[in-house]
Image: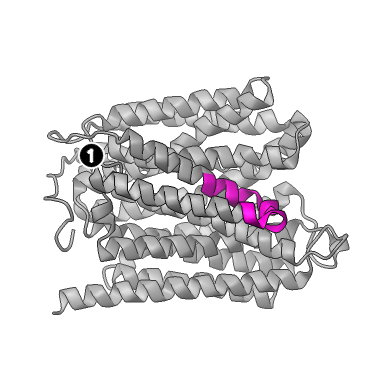
Amino acid sequence: MTGHPVGGVAAQAFPVARSEARLLVPALMFIALVVAAVASLGTPLITSVATSFHVSLGSAQWTLTAALLSGAVATPVLGRLGAGPHRRATILATLAVVVAGSALTVLPLPFAWLLAGRAAQGVGLGLTALMMGVARDHLPEERSTAVIALISVVSIIGAGVGYPLAALLAEFGGVRAAYGLGLVVTAAALLTAWRSMPKAPEGRSAHVDVAGAVVLAAALLLVLFLAGERNLWSRHLAVATGLAVATVVLLCVWAVIELRSTTPLVDVRAVRHPAVAGANLAMFVGGIGMYLLLTLITRYAQTPHGAGYGFGLTTFVAGLVLIPFSVLGFVAGKLTPRVRTRIADPLLLAGSAVVVGAGFALFAAARSDLADLFAAMGVLGFGVGGFSAAMPGVILAVTPKSETSSAMSFNYVVRSVGYSLGSAIGGLILAAGTGPGRLFPDDSAYTTAALVGIGAMAITTLTSLALARRRSSETNP
């Protein structure tokens, strides 16, 4: 760690033996990959769920929204529990909930049970921050830095892994077969955690702020509802605006509760540290841009030729477009720990944001050939991978080891909200570009959305550069 931790002295590391460390690292990666992939299963299956359960597409969309909501709420709660002495039990109990939820999605039960299962699966998203806490506590500092970076990247590319597999299984075996994949891998993750997760270092305590958790859950529910209900903004603007104001009020109330609590869900005072606040702002705006481009490319690929553009790809083939995203994202994640020995983390954030902006520019300028989409998706993956790998370094440089899970969990909530808004903004822009009586937007609407994305990444770049200047002034007074 560099600098002085916020909120106290860092706890002593509790390293594991070298042989155990070799088993621990792949276990951490596998669990982070599984929870991310399983949570993303709802994305390619929305149409299939609507058909199989005879519900509307809007209702089927909740199979994704329910997972995102439960994950956003569970993340800070698990982050706080993970900072205490019962981290191993927390990890095992959470994975047991995810396995139970996976079973509900496979069993021949009504649609309501499927939603309950998806909500239980989404709880697993909160484990990513705990995996980082385990790595920081039980691995040597140099090793833990690289592992934390990869965990952050794996939590992103998990969607790219789960999407095509789920689409393929749904195409040949139906929705239940696709969700069956989630049951198998989550059971494997539970067994892996039981065999490999060490106990937390002694001398820690953690209490969950129940009031803060309830208010935060209500605020996040409104955020995701407003992000998912795109028609609300176009048809009932006054209602949507009122709900948006209510969301802001709830978030302010939550902040007050956290500041007054002796055992806050999130240490808001630490979050106000310029480095942490700047990193979360960059994550929020950058998340909007990153998910916006991901949404644009996948939707463009599936648009039928009759619209005058697009490639009419099936869900499975469109999922294959995500392969460059996952591969190059992983490559960037592997390269970042080596590069960060020469380049500061905030500068890596800025450089990665520029790369994502280049992906937007490429998509805006050239998308007439399928190879163009693969190229844009690869550029996006490389930028997202680098950004995700550098982000923990910015936050953890001023965070004590005992608060690793809590600090990173808040960053992941910010990321989830940014991703949701990115998807919603993309939908709103494309809806605005759809002419009366037309099913698909004009091709120019995609260009407009790409330009908005470039603006978002420009803001992210400037924010990251400001962080870099601040760190430079602190190290070279």
In the picture, measured across the screen, residue 240 lies left or right of residue 137, that is right
Residue 464 visible from this viewpoint: yes
**Residue 4 magenta:** no
Depth check, front residue: 260 or 15: 260
Would you place residue 52 above or below residue 367 in this image? above
Residue 399: x and y in percent read 22, 54
Would you place residue 258 above or below residue 441 in this image? above
What is the quadrant of residue 104 in the picture?
top right
Placement of the N terminus among the 4 image quadrants: bottom left
In the picture, measured across the screen, residue 185 lies left or right of residue 282, that is right
What is the quadrant of residue 433 in the picture?
bottom right
Residue 193: x and y in percent read 36, 30
What is the quadrant of residue 372 in the picture?
bottom right
Q: What stretch is highlighted in magenta?
A: 222-239
Residue that badge 1 annotates: 263
Depth check, front residue: 70 or 244: 244
Residue 390: x and y in percent read 35, 62
Query: What residue is shown at x 35% (from left), y 55% (from top)?
Result: 149
Query: What residue is shown at x 61% (from left), y 53% (from top)?
Result: 240
Query: What residue is shown at x 64% (from left), y 46% (from top)?
Result: 164
Residue 31 visible from this viewpoint: no
Q: Which amino acid does label 1 sit on?
A: Thr
